[in-house]
Amino acid sequence: MRDGDHVMLNPSDTNVLAWLRHTKDGHAVVVACNFTAQPQSVGFDLRPYGVKGTKPVTLLKSPGEDDPSAFDKIALKPFGVMILAVH
């Protein structure tokens, strides 16, 4: 996660902070953090950032979080965090 471009995915969202790190060789990671006491749902289209993969693979998540099946709907429990690789 230290190499590559850093892109904020939802800068206008005041509840969930999310960003993308991706390298020129195709590796990509999405981080999403819910900073509220309510469940939140977010979705991302990564294609405009040159990311070709569409399948999220969970690298790390808060206890009790469900693994997302796609990037268009990621559910986060209160104060939940997810780190997802892109495949």
Image (spheres, grey):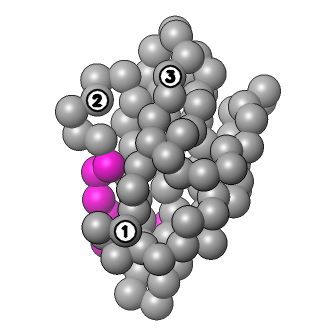
Describe residue 1's horizontal placement relative to residue 76 as left or right: left
Task: Please tell me whether residue 72 belongs to the stretch shown in magenta.
Answer: no
Q: Mark 2 belongs to which amino acid?
A: Asp
Distance, label 3 to label 2, CA atoms, is: 11 Å
First to last magenta residue range: 1-9
- Asked whether the beta carbons under mark 3 and mark 2 sit within 8 Å of each other, the answer is no
Q: Mark 1 belongs to which amino acid?
A: Arg
Residue that carries the numbered disc 2 in the rendered image: 13
Task: Name the residue furthest left.
Answer: 12
Label 1 neighbour load within 10 Å: few <14, some 14-19, many 20+: few
- Measuring 48% from the left and 84% from the top, which residue is drawn there? 26
Describe residue 33's horizontal placement relative to residue 75 as left or right: left
- Measuring 46% from the left and 15% from the top, which residue is drawn there? 36
Residue that carries the numbered disc 3 in the rendered image: 40
Give the image location of residue 60, x and y in percent: 69, 48
Placement of 68 over or under 28, stated as above or below: above
Q: Earlier in the sequence, mark 3 or mark 2?
A: 2
Asked where in the image residue 64 lies, by quadrant, the reply is: top right
- Measuring 39% from the left and 56% from the top, which residue is drawn there? 45
Q: Mark 3 belongs to which amino acid?
A: Gln
Placement of 87 over or under 20, stated as above or below: below
Residue that carries the numbered disc 1 in the rendered image: 47
2 vs 1, front mark: 1
Q: Secondary structure at mark 2?
A: loop
Distance, label 2 to label 1, CA atoms, is: 20 Å
Q: Secondary structure at mark 1?
A: helix
Label 3 neighbour load within 10 Å: few <14, some 14-19, many 20+: some
**Residue 79 appears in the rendering:** yes
